[in-house]
Image (spheres, grey):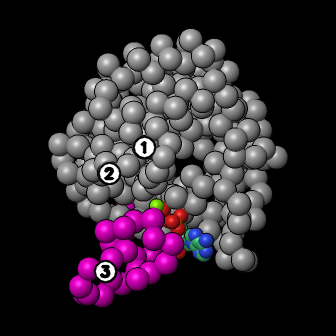
Amino acid sequence: MSRTALQVRGLHASVGGLAILKGVDLEVPFGEVHAIMGPNGSGKSTLCHVLAGKSGYEVSGAMAVDGVSLADLDVYQRAQAGLFQAFQYPVGIPGLDLAVLLEEAAVALGAGPEEARERIATQTRRLGMERFLNRSVNGDLSGGEKKRSEVFQLAVLEPRVMVLDEIDSGLDIDSVREVAGAVEEIRSGEVAILMITHYSRILNYVRPDRVHIMMNGQIVDSGGPELADELEDGGYSAVRSRLGMTVPKVATRTPSVSDFFTDTPFDL
Ligand code: ADP
Ligand code: MG
């Protein structure tokens, strides 16, 4: 049987008494790519934050990376346990060069300095990152370049579990294809990848082993890649009616900002 890389059991999370995650169960074995898809506000980013150890949530339930429980660990200790989160909106860090960040981070995660530099050199060639290395992290990068930089960091740091929160959001189709190609390249038996995505577009390029659908803080359905195809064809309402869930009435309205910025934690 394949070893479990990421295990989540009965995970609940709330903010100020408001329940957001309502019992999430998830298992991702090494070597597999799992996608979590769900409408805006279903709790996808909260799941990423809670896994990474962001403060401000009341959390209960179990989370483990390669058998190591995350519950009592700080953010950096979760990274040391092998968890890496790529951000939906990577922030710039003026004054800190990408090469310096990566060498320090790789060493902090247990690589020798020589090995760290070697990994950086190898992945730089592989992902064509030469011109970004000696610039500030995410400084003046386009959306696509920031996402490529995130994948480059993943490739160098070699985590056991990668959580990619909407790595495709805000990208044009060529960038989606490029970022997906980079994710496919780092796919291996040593890593589990959890791809959070709102649209099935990226799943045309990174084929997941399993697809989970999250609604209202729970995983309501899991299946093979065909689930993403169902969503592509019928949207979330098709899934809701198949599962016998009540379909909320959608009033005709003009699109709002939160339709485009999908981790906005409130309706604009
Ligand atoms: P998704 O990533 O699936 O779009 P989120 O995890 O960002 O969803 O948000 C899930 C729900 O929790 C939303 O209704 C959001 O408004 C709410 N939420 C998230 N973070 C907070 C917070 N810090 N305070 C209050 N509500 C929050
Ligand atoms: Mg989100």
Report the residue that reaches farthest toward the front: 95
Q: Nearer the viewer, residue 124 or 179?
A: 124
Q: Residues within 10 Å of mark 2 (few under 14, many from 20)?
A: few
- Mark 1 to mark 3 CA distance (whole Å): 33 Å
131 in magenta: no
Q: Label 2 near label 1: C-beta < 8 Å?
A: yes
Q: In the rendered image, is residue 240 in sight?
A: no
Identify the secondary structure beneath mark 1: strand
267 in magenta: yes
Judged by depth in the image, the label closer to the viewer, 1 or 3, is 1
Marks 1 and 3, the one that precedes in the sequence:
1
Residue with the mark numbered 2: 140
Q: Which residues are magenta?
A: 239-268
Judged by depth in the image, the label closer to the viewer, 3 or 2, is 2
Identify the secondary structure beneath mark 2: loop
Marks 3 and 2, the one that precedes in the sequence:
2
Q: Which mark is residue 136?
A: 1
Q: Is residue 241 above or below residue 143?
A: below
